[in-house]
Image (cartoon, rainbow, N blue to C red):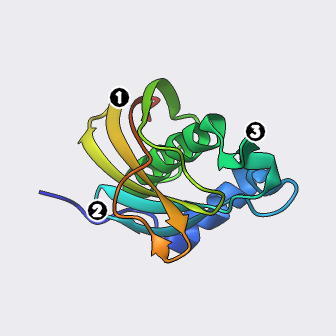
Amino acid sequence: MRADPKMSLAEVEAFLEAEFPQLRHGGRMVSVESVGPMSARLRLHSDERHLRPGGTVSGPAMFMLADVGIYVAILAQIGPVALAVTTNLNINFLRKPPHGDVLAEISLLKLGKRLAVGEATLFAQGPDGFDDEPVAHAVGTYSIPPR
């Protein structure tokens, strides 16, 4: 059974603003579009600092989006626990994303008292909207501190 999140979209955004102002350094980099039961959707607002030679969105930028996305889905579900940390994140880059925004669809696979596992599927924005084929897929494990 999937429980409703403990944090709303507005509460998650306020938490990130207070605890992770570096996400806004140099302009808004990531926005949370939605949170739901065991899920979230985030957008990377891609600009020049996220590009690699050849004009495609860089691997480190997509890795950051996946990491932040899974973290957000966990926080929305359990509440504001700033010290939940990534213990492992594996990402597979599937296709080169064109220069444009990247959307991360997040799903939590397991949410226990001390560990959470989630996946992020990333989609690139092309000239006609977001492509149906993912550009990257990540799976991450996060440690949740005791309450």
Real-space Cα separation, disc 2 to disc 3, in angstroms: 38 Å
Q: Is residue 60 left or right of residue 87?
A: right
Q: Amino acid at mark 3?
A: Pro
Q: Amino acid at mark 2?
A: Pro
Crowd rating for badge 3 (residues with CA inside 10 Å; few <14, some 14–19, many 20+)? few
- The count of marks equals 3
135 or 12, which lies in front? 135
Q: Amino acid at mark 1?
A: Arg
Which of the marked residues, 2 or 1, is nearer the chain's N terminus?
2
Crowd rating for badge 2 (residues with CA inside 10 Å; few <14, some 14–19, many 20+)? some
Q: Which residue is mark 3?
A: 53
Is residue 83 placed above or below 8 in the rendered structure? above
Disc 1 element = loop
Residue at image position (34%, 35%) is 116
Q: For residue 93, which numbered disc appears in the image? A: none
Disc 2 element = loop
Crowd rating for badge 1 (residues with CA inside 10 Å; few <14, some 14–19, many 20+)? few
Q: Quadrant of the N terminus?
A: bottom left
Q: Which residue is mark 2?
A: 37
Q: Can residue 118 be seen by looking at this rendering? A: yes
Q: Residue furthest front?
A: 54
Q: Which residue is mark 1?
A: 114
Whole-percent x and y of residue 68?
A: 55, 46
